[in-house]
Structures are given as C-alpha cells and as structure tokens.
Amino acid sequence: MTIKEKVFESQGVSWWIVLLEGIAAVVIGILLITSPDKTGNLLLRLLGIFFLIKGGLGIVSIFTDRDNWPYKLLMGIVGILVGLMIFLAPLAAFGIIRGTLWLLVGMGAVTLGFIEIARALKGGGCGIAFLGAVIILLGLIVLGNPMLPPGTYANLLGGVSIVGGIATIVMAFGMRS
C-alpha cells in the first residue's frame, strides 16, 4: 500500500470515490485533447462557479467562526471578484489564465513526475519511474517554452490528466483489495 493510499484510508475515503476521481480525470483529459476549446470554456465556467461559491462561503464562515475574520473576508471578496470577472469578462479571464497556463501545466507535470518517481522508489517498479521521468521532461519543456501554441497546452494538460487518472484508477483498485 502506497503512502497516498494510506492517507486516503486514514481519512475514511472509500476506494470507489478514488476510482470516480480517476475516471473523471481520464474523461477530462480526453475532452481536453479531442475538444480543447469547448472543454476549456466549460472548465473556465466551472472555475468561475467555484470562486463564487468559495468566496461566498468564506464570508459566511465569518459569522460562524470569528477566528481570522480579516483573512476570511479578504479571501471571500477576492473569490467573489474573480468569479464575477470570469462570468462578466470571460475573454479577459481566459487571457489571464492563458498567460499563466504554461506555468501551471509545467509545474503540475514536474510535480506529478516526481510523485511517480517517489512511488517507483517505494516498490512501484521501473515502468512507473520511466513514466515519472517522461512527465518531468514534458514539464521542463513546457516551462522552458512559455509561448507554445494554446492547443499544445490543452494536449499536454489532457495527457497529464489521463496519466494521472489512470494512476488514480490503479490506486483505487489497490485500495479495494
């Protein structure tokens, strides 16, 4: 059992929830590769909803727990403003996200690659180590080339999502047994 599996089990997360997360990651990855524009638009809208809800709940939480209320208020206001920006000016929001997407994709790939290598060192096998090295290499390529065409980011993010989703599915079945 890997460290991540132990953490999930210690937090009472059922294997089937982890399986659903893996399936969702694979589906999103496939959609990002096959239909990047529509998927990107959907994910941007979901991100806007997330920020609005997070911001609203941050402000509401001040009334239930006054600890760190200035922080909660600031986070709530920022969340609501970002959520509104995404809905009222989606092109500007997309431009900002597009401008930082290379950093998110690159750092995410490098992080995922190191996690895979760590998993390989804990008995995951040479295949996982090789996969981790390839993902790190892809992440470094993205970080070194911030002006790649937008479709490239969608394909890379989709690929990383598929790989991460498959790894999560495998982990879920490992938790089941």
Image: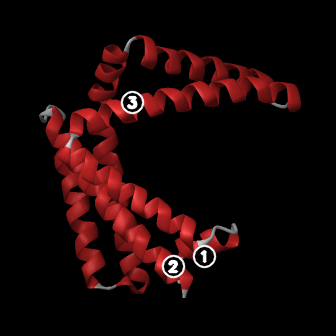
**How far across and down, in percent of the image, does residue 35 sit?**
21, 41
Cα distance, mark 1 to mark 3?
33 Å
- Identify the image quadrant of residue 128: bottom left
> In the image, what residue type sits under mark 1?
Lys
Visible in this render: residue 13? yes
Give me the disc on residue 44: 3
Please tell me which residue is depicted at 31% across the width and 16% down the height of the picture: 91
**How far across and down, in percent of the image, does residue 127 sit?**
25, 80
**Pointer 2 with pointer 1, Cβ within 8 A:** yes
> In the image, what residue type sits under mark 2?
Thr
> In the image, what residue type sits under mark 3?
Leu
- Neighbours of disc 1 within 10 Å: few (<14), some (14-19), many (20+): few
Give me the disc on residue 2: 2
Above or below — where is 70 with respect to 164?
above
64 or 23: nearer the viewer: 23
Give me the disc on residue 6: 1
125 or 80: nearer the viewer: 80
Q: Secondary structure at mark 3?
A: helix
Q: Secondary structure at mark 1?
A: helix
